[in-house]
Image: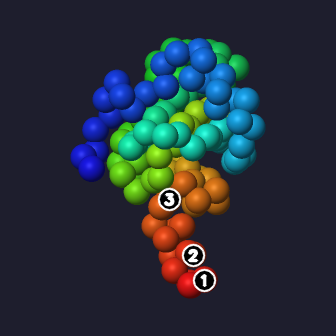
Amino acid sequence: MSNKFTQAHRLRKADEFSSVFVFRKVRVGKFFKLHYKPNELTHSRLGFMVSKKVHKRANQRNYIKRTIREFFRIEQSDWMPLDLIVRAQKHFTPEHYPLIIAELKQLCTKFKLNSNVQKTSNSAGS
């Protein structure tokens, strides 16, 4: 799978967001809260929420969104198909970038977004 982030990889409609929130699967970190729900598609889809409470300036909120989008673009090919909403909880700056990526990877591994982790655990039990 290519590392693209097309329209098909986005959660866009309110009912798509609502269905993920209703599913009630959440993982929480220092900077992010991740809501997720398995989907029936062949790829994962991403939605994100960065409110003015996180940062008042739009350019800072956009930086946070770009960071999330880039992480998703690079990592999505290793994930099982799911709908994922990333909610920013706390402001971060470019100096925090390594921490942000580490937290996102840890949260994704924590609830087995990474299909490689699932395959390893399944093959160990066989």
Q: What quarter of the picture does the C terminus occupy?
A: bottom right
Query: For numbered disc 3, what is the local secondary structure?
Result: loop
Q: Earlier in the sequence, mark 3 or mark 2?
A: 3
- Mark nearest the camera among 1 and 2 is 1
Q: Amino acid at mark 3?
A: Asn
- Mark nearest the camera among 1 and 3 is 1
The residue that appears at 64% across and 56% down in the rendered structure is 111
Question: How would you rate the neighbour count of disc 1 (Cα within 10 Å): few for under 14, some for 14-19, many for 20 or more?
Answer: few
Q: Amino acid at mark 1?
A: Gly
Work out how far the residue at label 1 is from the one at label 2, CA to CA, in angstroms: 7 Å
The mark found on residue 125 in the picture is: 1
Residue 59 visible at all = yes
Are the residues at dot 1 and dot 2 in contact (C-beta closer than 8 Å)? Answer: yes
Write down the residue under mark 2. 121
* Vertical relation: 95 (above or below) 10: below
Scheme by which the image is coloured: rainbow
Work out how far the residue at label 1 is from the one at label 3, CA to CA, in angstroms: 18 Å
The residue that appears at 57% across and 75% down in the rendered structure is 121
Q: Amino acid at mark 2?
A: Ser
Tell me the quarter of the picture where residue 110 sits: bottom right
In the image, 69 versus 98, the foreground residue is 69
The residue that appears at 48% across and 19% down in the rendered structure is 12
The mark found on residue 114 in the picture is: 3
Tell me the quarter of the picture where residue 16 sits: top right
User: Where does residue 78 sit, x and y in percent of width and height?
Assistant: 40, 57
